[in-house]
Image: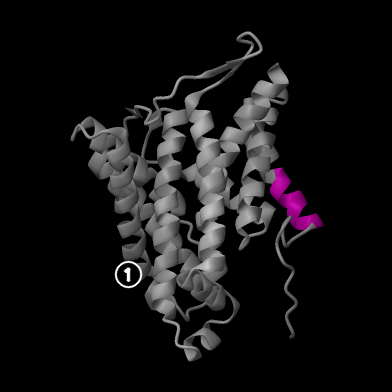
């Protein structure tokens, strides 16, 4: 039963990574940039939910909705103020700006909420599922996390393939110049992408802190980095790839903690990234694009 328990825990953790990776992969797929402040948006979303339940006395559902709205607005503001002026700038400039935004959010959180860890109350109030005469127990948070990941993947895939805005995103992903000539508002499309990605970050932050109930200004830092690894592993720019990469990375991390050691688990995660880049740089489900020089 230890194997099944570790597998379920890995899928649960991987589902959180997958939701975060979806934000990375959407922004990169449309705007062709890496938003390294994404992990800090996760932290902000968790803090908004924490304050809404602890200080305002809102129900978990309203607190989660407020967190999603807050992070969505934050994502749009970050894109307009920090990234839009650098639309045609070199990639290094955008990368440095993203790191600067990340440090700004972390230090703002330190000033507002201080550095002491907060005890996060889970937003999931479902009973655990007991199987095999109690030998295998699946928590309510695990079931909700996996279900949320599947629903989000299906919803995003449907949105990008069926809706008008989703088709505009795909057009911008292929060629922003051609998309402009076809009458697509590229700036609004990129802002919408940031809004969706930041809303997903809020959901991931709430689920992460529900499963691991300790909240600090650096809560989203390591999960954000590992979710980026998951996006690269699955094929950055691919929605199913982000989910596949996230789940695989979560399983690898949990099994590494169980059979190798907690201190070595992070090393194993990043070793997976190196091996993936050496064997298949485009990722498991990513498309290999040939460029003429």
**From which residue to which does the magenta span run?**
271-279
In the displayed structure, does residue 133 sit left or right of residue 176? right
- In terms of depth relative to the viewer, which is nearer, 242 or 160? 160
> Is residue 100 visible from the viewing direction of this image?
no
In the displayed structure, does residue 205 sit left or right of residue 253? left
Residue furthest out toward the right: 279
By secondary structure, the bulk of the magenta-drawn segment is best described as helix
In the displayed structure, does residue 144 sit left or right of residue 108? right
Rendered residue at 34%/53% (across/down):
71
Helix or strand or loop: what does disc 1 sit on? Answer: helix
In the displayed structure, does residue 217 sit left or right of residue 30? left
Rendered residue at 63%/32% (across/down):
10
Q: Position of residue 126 (x, y in %)?
A: 43, 24
> Is residue 10 visible from the viewing direction of this image?
yes
| Residue on which the image places disc 1 | 81
- In terms of depth relative to the viewer, which is nearer, 278 or 140? 140
How crowded is the residue under tag 1: few (<14 C-alpha within 10 Å), some, or many (20+)? few
Q: Position of residue 274 (x, y in %)?
A: 73, 51
Q: Position of residue 59 (x, y in %)?
A: 26, 33
Rendered residue at 42%/31% (across/down):
210
Rendered residue at 49%/34% (across/down):
144
How many numbered circles are shown? Answer: 1
- In terms of depth relative to the viewer, which is nearer, 129 or 215? 129
Q: Is residue 182 above or below residue 164?
A: below
């Amino acid at each position: 039963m230890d194997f099944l328990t570790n597998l379920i825990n890995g899928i649960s953790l991987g589902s959180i990574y997958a939701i975060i990776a979806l934000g990375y992969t959407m922004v990169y797929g449309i705007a062709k940039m890496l938003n390294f402040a994404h992990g800090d948006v996760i932290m902000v979303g968790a803090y908004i939910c924490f304050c809404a339940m602890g200080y305002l006395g809102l129900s978990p559902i309203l607190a989660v909705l407020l967190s999603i709205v807050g992070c969505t607005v934050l994502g749009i503001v970050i894109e307009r103020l920090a990234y839009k002026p650098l639309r045609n700038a070199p990639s290094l400039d955008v990368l440095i700006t993203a790191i600067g935004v990340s440090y700004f959010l972390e230090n703002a959180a330190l000033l507002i909420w201080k550095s002491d860890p907060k005890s996060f109350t889970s937003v999931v109030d479902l009973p655990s599922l007991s199987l095999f005469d109690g030998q295998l127990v699946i928590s309510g948070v695990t079931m909700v996390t996996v279900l949320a990941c599947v629903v989000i993947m299906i919803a995003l895939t449907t949105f990008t393939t069926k809706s008008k805005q989703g088709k505009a995103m795909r057009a911008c992903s292929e060629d922003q110049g051609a998309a402009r000539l076809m009458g697509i508002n590229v700036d609004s499309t990129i802002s919408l992408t940031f809004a969706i990605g930041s809303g997903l970050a809020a959901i991931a932050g709430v689920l992460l802190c529900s499963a691991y109930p300790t909240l600090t200004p650096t809560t989203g830092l390591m999960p954000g980095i590992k979710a980026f690894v998951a996006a690269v592993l699955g094929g950055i720019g691919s929605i199913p790839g982000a989910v596949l990469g996230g789940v695989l990375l979560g399983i690898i991390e949990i099994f590494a903690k169980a059979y190798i050691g907690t201190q070595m688990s992070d090393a194993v995660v990043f070793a997976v990234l190196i091996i993936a880049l050496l064997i298949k740089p485009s990722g498991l489900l990513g498309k290999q694009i040939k460029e003429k020089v």
